[in-house]
Image (tube, rainbow, N blue to C red):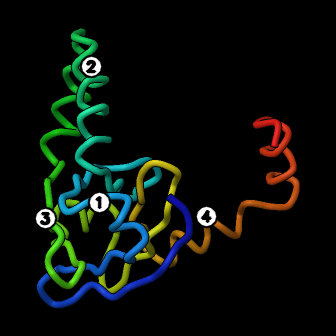
Amino acid sequence: MIGNATHTIDSKSRLFLPVKMREELGDSVYLVKGLDNCISVMSVEKWRSYELKLKSQSDSRARAIQRVICSSAARCDVDAQGRIVLPQKLREYAGLENDATIVGVIDHAELWNPGRWSGYENEFTADDLADAMELFDV
């Protein structure tokens, strides 16, 4: 999954997902707290894989992580217009008010506060890109 787009969140907390991303994500998605205060958007298949990884550990730290992640996660159906409803708790976590920037990240999408995304993207310098290319041997 690649690319990014910014869309308005309507008065009913609905957000339009770009067609190409919807094609890869499917008719239902899971919304989960992501790293760096974004929301991860996963296909059902990706969520099942994520769930297995979460269940693979059973110590007290793993249980705490399972509780925090699963208690705020939500399954959302994509409506006929290509929109999902964003739960208020996840909107607050990601700082999403009127708009959201949707970013493709290989096997999932992320929803970002547009200002936070812009800052994050602008912090990534040409030197950072060169380091990444070397690290991943690209």
Q: Position of residue 88 (x, y in %)?
A: 15, 68
User: Where does label 2 land, which residue?
Assistant: 62
- In primary-sequence order, the first of circles 1 and 4 is 1
Given the image, on which type of amino acid does mark 1 rest?
Tyr
- The numbered mark, 2 or 3, whose residue comes first in the sequence reads 2
Residue ID for mark 4:
120
| Residue sitting farthest toward the front | 23
Badge 2 crowding class, 10 Å Cα cut-off, few under 14, some 14 to 19, many 20 or more, is: some
Quick one: 92 or 73, which is closer to the camera? 73
Q: Is residue 31 left or right of residue 129?
A: left
Camera-side residue of 45 and 88: 45
Measured from the top left, where is residue 74 in percent x and y? 14, 53
Label 1, on which residue? 93
- Label 4 SS: helix
Q: Amino acid at mark 4?
A: Tyr
Q: Residue at x 26, y 59 (%)?
A: 26
Closer to the N terminus: mark 4 or mark 3? 3
**Residue placed under numbered mark 3 in the picture:** 77
Q: Residue at x 73, y 60 (%)?
A: 124
Which of the two residues, 136 or 23, is positioned nearer the viewer here?
23
Query: Mark 3: which amino acid?
Result: Asp
Q: Are marks 3 and 1 in contact (CB under 8 Å)?
A: no
Q: Quadrant of residue 134?
A: top right
State which tag comes first along the sequence, 4 or 2.
Answer: 2
